[in-house]
Amino acid sequence: MSKPRTHALSDLLDELEGTVEGESVRVEDVIEALGHSSFASLMLVFSLICTSPASAIPGVTALLALMVFILVAQMMVGRKSLWLPGFITRRRLSSEKLCKGIKWLRKPVRFVERFLKPRFTWFFHRPWIWVPLILVMALTLFMPFMEFVPTSGSIASGVIALFAASLLTRDGVLALLSLPLLAVIPVTIYYWI
């Protein structure tokens, strides 16, 4: 995994914004901009998109859940480079809604990243890292159904974003804090549905 960076989350938003050209952005363009081996960055970006106003687009929550599921599965088997099927990489996101989402995320991201730093990094090694990865995979299985429950998909994506931010910044404290949320949300959604 890459070394933690100062303002890593804001840097990601900058990189994501840099992919915006024309009226829409292909998923493949986002992956190319962030790098096929940047699993933590890609997980964070996919989940942040789903917490933003861009998630209002029908099908976005389900699509991003599928992408995160595939991404986590490949992390668990030790792939060095992300692969996604063509029907996902060819999908397009509205540039206008994506930019609105990025703008909306900047303030909370700037606030959160002030508190993130490398801590408890042992948690990011096997077998410990398997616990949150399995919980993230379980949560993504529920996310397509969350499109029927207003804001629930954004909440689930926000929790995945917390874990992804901990991966990117190597902050084991944040990773540990995300565990109960990753475990509780699928159960809560199950009872809502």
Image (cartoon, helix red, strand yellow):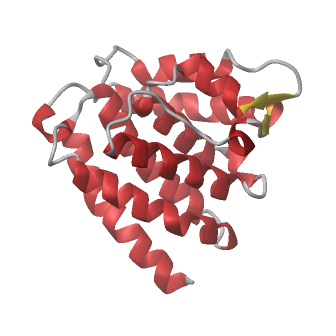
Could you tell me how many numbered marks the image carries?
0
Q: Which residue extends farthest right?
A: 23
Task: Please indicate whether residue 188 sits to the left or right of residue 51 in the image.
Answer: left
Residue 90 appears left or right of 63: right
Q: Residue at x 50, y 48 (%)?
A: 70
**Above or below — where is 117 with respect to 94?**
above
Q: Residue 95 lies in what quarter of the image?
A: top right
Answer with the quarter of the image where residue 131 lies: bottom left
Residue 86 drawn at (x, y percent): 71, 39
Decide if residue 97 is on the left or right side of residue 5: right
Residue 34 in picture, x, y percent from top left: 54, 20
Q: Residue at horizontal 34%, vertical 15%? A: 5
Q: For this rendering, which residue is in front, 90 or 120?
A: 90
Instruction: Assign the N terminus to one quadrant of the image.
Output: top left
Using the image, determine if residue 22 lies above or below residue 40. above
Residue 135 percent across, percent down from the top left: 34, 60
Q: Pick the quarter of the image with the C terminus.
A: bottom right
* Residue at figure coordinates x 49%, y 76% from the top left: 189
The percent coordinates of residue 151 (x first, y second) are 61, 62
**Whether residue 36 is situated above or below residue 182 in the rendered picture:** above
Q: Residue at the spot x=66%, y=52% of the render?
A: 63
